[in-house]
Structure formats: structure tokens, C-alpha cells
Amino acid sequence: MRHLPAVLFLALALPCITSAGPARANLIYVLNSADASISLVDSISREEVRRIPVLREVHHLLLTPDRKELMVGDSGGNELIFIDPATAEVTRRERFSNPYHMEYSPDGQYLVVTSLRRDQVDIYEAATRTLLARLKVPDKPSHLAFSPDSRFAYVTLQGARKLMAIDLAERKPVWFAEVGSQPAGVIWHNGRLLVGIMGSDHIAVVNPAEARVERTVFIGRGAHTIFPAPDGRALYVTSRVDSRITVLDPATLEPKARWDIPGGPDCIAFDPDGKLWVTLRWVARIAMVDTATGAAETIPVGRSPHGIFVQPRREPMAPLLSAAGPQPPRPATAASEPEDLQAERPIQPARATAASSPALAPTQAPVLAPTLAPAAATRPAEPPAEASPWWRQWLRR
């Protein structure tokens, strides 16, 4: 009997000791638009372990073509922030004109950046980030997508109710199509463009050859943007006002399920295990969603979380809630810096959030029960009530 404690210890420990070694975590990057910071969440502990301060207001991010750097756009601070995605080290910062949404063309030749506040779309040479063309457009250019051959970029214009096509070789608009109130996210899918109509309740299916809407698919109020599953078996559409994620069949675009996720689901990223991570814009949380069941577990982060990125398979990061260490100095100017930035005053970085902040206090993450709906695209019998004012101030961002 005196050896019983040791036997029990080994029995409990052995299942955790495998040839693959200890469990490896994913590192989740979350852009807190209203907190001037980037939260780093450990997927194993389900906790925020670090926070990186930024200048003003981060919204979107993407990997560089060589996948070695994570590029974060601080639209309010007129800055690009470059981060080593494996270590969360800020490697450098560059002055940049109001980077709201940005994408590389499929051939890697261009970097296209939309400026929501300045009503401009910038076309850069991807390798050097040298400005090739600046298009002044009406009104509030938001998200963008490309044709597979990299010939065209497509940009939603939130204030103009339109989708715009840009010829990248000629660097000029070639058509505008009326798509609906406050168009937001856009993706290329099976020869068509799918556009989230954020001021209404559906996605618009646009024929790019004819520059017209062919059909609409009901999603829910505040239909924001569309995210293809990594295996291509589903499309996930977020509705920020009705707080739901709708699962679409990629071939027919018919809804297969609807999951109620309170808090205003916004941007989505996927981890290597197929789980879906989504920012909840109104409640300062992110949710991890099981795509097999729709069950969601939420984790506190900063205010108004927007863009999200998963860095797969890394060792757990040691907690450091104050900041990500010293930040490299910001350059006074950059070789390709647009003229409209050269006269602007430097902006002081925001302070890192203290470990005692209520948003970072340990809490038990609630599990949200999924709501599954029949696979039908029919609209409700009666129109939904007017949305309450609490979401209006952020609806256009």
C-alpha cells in the first residue's frame, strides 16, 4: 500500500507522455481595435498570455508571401507593424497611409491596400511596398479580393453601395456595380464574387463578367463577410447584428446550419485541428467554435476585437501580460512613404494593459450552445425589428 501514491501518479501521467512529446499550442493573434493593442492567446490554456501595444487602431492583418512575417495594419496610426508569427517579436514598423484592409495578389506581384477614412485604394509593388498608383474613390473603400489570374482587384465601397473592379495592369477602375447597403467582405468563389451586405441581411452573388447581382442569399442582419473552410467543404458567413454564423454549402450556397454566437461575430481564422476562431466585436471576447457541433467557448481579450490569425503548432508561451518587450524605434520616414504622411506628427504609442485590468482577470469561459436551423434560405415571415443603436457606431468599420 505504501507504493500506491506512486502507482497512481504514473497511471495519471502516462497518457500525457507520448512519442510526440507534450501538447503543442497554437498562438492566436487578436487585433483589439478599441484598445490600441494586439492580444496573444494560448490555445491550450485558453488564456491571453501577452499584449502588444500599437499606436491607435488595428483592424486587419496578413502573412507576407514568404510566410515569415505577420503584417498588421494600424489604420489610425498610419503604420504597418511586422511581427515574427512564431515568437510574437515585433521586428519593425513602417509609416504607411491608413492601412485598413490589405491583400497580396495571387501572383505575389501587388499589394493592394484600402483606406476607409481617406477614400483611397493604393496599389503597391509587393516586394518593395513602393506605391504604384493611388485611386481616389467614393466612398469608404472597405474589403477587397482578387480574380484568380491577378488581373483584377475588387473593392467594396461601403458608403456608395457599390462593388468596384480595378484593372491592376492599367491601374484604373473598369466597372462599378450596385450591390446593396454598406457592402463589406468580398471573396472570389467559383467564378462569382460573394459580398456581405452589412447594412442589410444577405450576401450578394455578383457576376464579374456582367458586373451585376445575380442572386441574394439570406444570412441575417449585419451580414459581414465570408470565410471558406480550409478543406473547401463549407463557407462560413458572419452576421454582426443578429450575432450568428451561417454555414453555406459551397456548391449551392444554400444554408446548412446557423449558429447563434452572442457578441457580434466578425472575423474568422482556422486552426490545424479544424476548429474555428472568431472575434466577438461587441463583448471584448473571441470564441473557439467546434465546426462539427457549433458549440462555442469564449475567451476575454481587448475591446472591439476585429482581425484574427492562428499561428499553428508552437510551444506554449510564458505569460507576460504587460507587453511584448521593448519595441523597435519607429523610422522617421520610409523610402516609399507617401507624401501625405511626411508632414504628420509622430503619435505616441498606447500604454500596455496592466495585468490587473478587469478584461484580463481570470474568468471561466462560458460555453455557448449552438442553434441549428433547417437548410433553407427563406426569409422570415416578418421583417426583423430595427437594430438597437448600440451597434451603429461600429457598423461602418
Image (tube, rainbow, N blue to C red):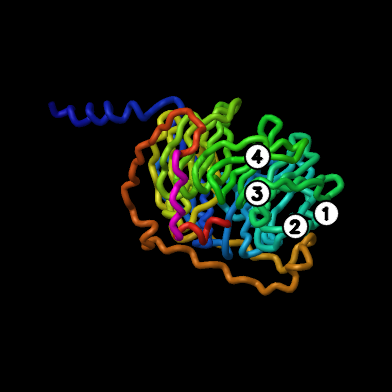
Q: Residue at x 45, y 35 (%)?
A: 258
- For numbered disc 2, what is the local secondary structure? loop
Of the residues tagged 4 and 1, which is closer to the observer? 4
* Mark nearer the N terminus (1 vs 2): 1
Find the residue positioned furthest to the right: 170
For label 1, the crowd category at 10 Å Cα-Cα, with few meaning under 14, some 14 to 19 and many 20 or more, is: few
Magenta part of the protein: which range? 381-389
Which numbered circle lies on residue 132?
Answer: 1
Image quarter of the C terminus: bottom right
Residue indicated by mark 4:
187
Q: Tell me residue 235's x, y (percent).
A: 56, 33
* Mark nearer the N terminus (4 vs 1): 1
* Mark nearer the N terminus (3 vs 2): 2
* Mark nearer the N terminus (2 vs 4): 2
Of the residues tagged 3 and 2, which is closer to the observer? 2
Residue indicated by mark 2:
137
Of the residues tagged 1 and 3, which is closer to the observer? 3
Of the pair 145 and 45, the residue shown nearer to us: 145
For label 3, the crowd category at 10 Å Cα-Cα, with few meaning under 14, some 14 to 19 and many 20 or more, is: many
Amino acid carrying label 4: it is Ile
Amino acid carrying label 2: it is Val
Label 2, label 4: how far apart the Cα atoms are: 20 Å
Label 1, label 2: how far apart the Cα atoms are: 16 Å
Of the residues tagged 1 and 2, which is closer to the observer? 2
Of the residues tagged 2 and 4, which is closer to the observer? 2
- Relative to 10, is 137 on the left or the right? right
Of the pair 255 and 73, the residue shown nearer to us: 255
